[in-house]
Image (cartoon, rainbow, N blue to C red):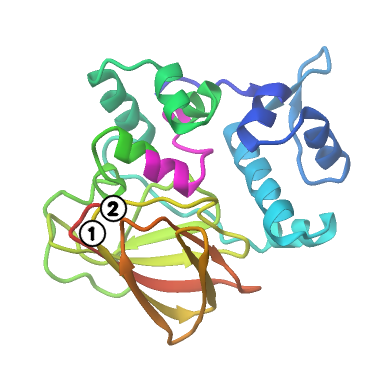
């Protein structure tokens, strides 16, 4: 994979959906820490861009003040995903090139900047879960397949031995509970405080969610909202636009099943 090329303030602002002046304000508030060139120009790494996206979501959806956002970011679960085989970004780039599509074309379809898509392909980080799901669908594949889940696997997954998805979204851990080509995608989602899909997405099939701990806010078709606590379950058709967010102060843990494996 090529060396990461950091984004300038205007590019990072486009990815996060805010103005450059907002990024500068967040830096002054101690929420962001871009590097600087000798000329003073700000440069944002993929991790810093992802952090800016998370701050933007927290401000927009929860209305937290800077101190509360700082605390939410500090309490976020560390990213422990360990990609196996070909990196996620490289897989995405290979599929795009195989389709003969340019960065600008795909970015326009997804409604994101070409810089954001380029960062994802180079580093495997820096987009929302919704964008990842939309991108997989556009490329004619699934998020599960991009994670390498369609490779052969045994029938039993032992406690503590579940493989973790390579995941470009901060604050989200996805553990694979059933490997190989199955009729169901079975996962354990661990959502850090503030973690969210950041928009609705859909695909074919049906889904089942059971909340093990914490609280999940699920929104269907943009209008039907469900606040689910530990022990609650929900079943819905995957084609319905679904958006989700951790509604708890701490972690939220879910069992999430999709069938057939179109996710």
Q: Residues within 10 Å of mark 1 (few under 14, many from 20)?
A: some
Q: Quadrant of the N terminus?
A: top left
Foreground of the two, 18 or 51 = 18
Please tell me whether residue 154 belongs to the stretch shown in magenta: no
Q: Residues within 10 Å of mark 2 (few under 14, many from 20)?
A: many
Q: Position of residue 25 (x, y in %)?
A: 86, 38
Who comes first in sequence, dot 2 or dot 1? Answer: 1
Direction from residue 50 to residue 101 in the image, left or right: left
At a point 12% along the width and 63% down the height, the residue shown is 154
Quarter occupied by residue 137:
top left
- Asked if disc 2 and disc 1 are in contact, CB closer than 8 Å, the reply is yes
Q: Position of residue 111 (x, y in %)?
A: 50, 31
Q: Which residues are magenta?
A: 121-134
Q: Is residue 103 visible?
A: yes
Determine which residue is flagged by label 2.
263
Direction from residue 119 to residue 64 in the image, left or right: right
Q: Disc 2 versus disc 1: distance between alpha carbons?
A: 8 Å
Q: Is residue 225 above or below residue 47?
A: below
Q: Position of residue 178 (x, y in %)?
A: 20, 65
């Amino acid at each position: 994979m090529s060396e990461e090329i950091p984004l300038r303030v205007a590019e990072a602002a486009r990815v996060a959906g805010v103005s450059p002046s907002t990024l500068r304000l967040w830096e002054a508030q101690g929420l962001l820490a871009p590097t600087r060139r000798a000329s003073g120009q700000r440069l944002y790494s993929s991790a810093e861009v992802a952090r800016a996206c998370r701050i933007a979501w927290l401000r927009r959806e929860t209305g937290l003040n800077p101190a509360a956002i700082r605390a939410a970011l500090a309490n976020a679960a560390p990213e422990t995903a360990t990609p196996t085989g070909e990196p996620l970004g490289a897989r995405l780039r290979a599929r795009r090139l195989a389709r003969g599509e340019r960065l600008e074309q795909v970015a326009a379809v997804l409604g994101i900047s070409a810089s954001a898509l380029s960062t994802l392909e180079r580093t495997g980080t820096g987009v929302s879960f919704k964008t990842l799901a939309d991108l997989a669908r556009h490329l004619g594949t699934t998020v599960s397949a991009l994670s390498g889940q369609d490779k052969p696997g045994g029938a039993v997954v032992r406690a503590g031995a579940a493989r973790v998805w390579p995941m470009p979204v901060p604050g989200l851990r996805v553990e694979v509970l059933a490997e190989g080509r199955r009729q169901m995608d079975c996962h354990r989602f661990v959502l850090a405080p503030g973690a969210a899909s950041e928009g609705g997405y859909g695909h074919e099939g049906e889904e089942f969610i059971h909340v093990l701990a914490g609280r999940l806010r699920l929104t269907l078709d943009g209008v039907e909202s469900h606040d689910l606590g530990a022990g609650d379950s929900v079943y819905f058709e995957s084609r319905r636009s679904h958006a989700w967010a951790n509604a708890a102060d701490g972690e939220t843990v879910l069992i999430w099943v999709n069938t057939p494996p179109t996710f």
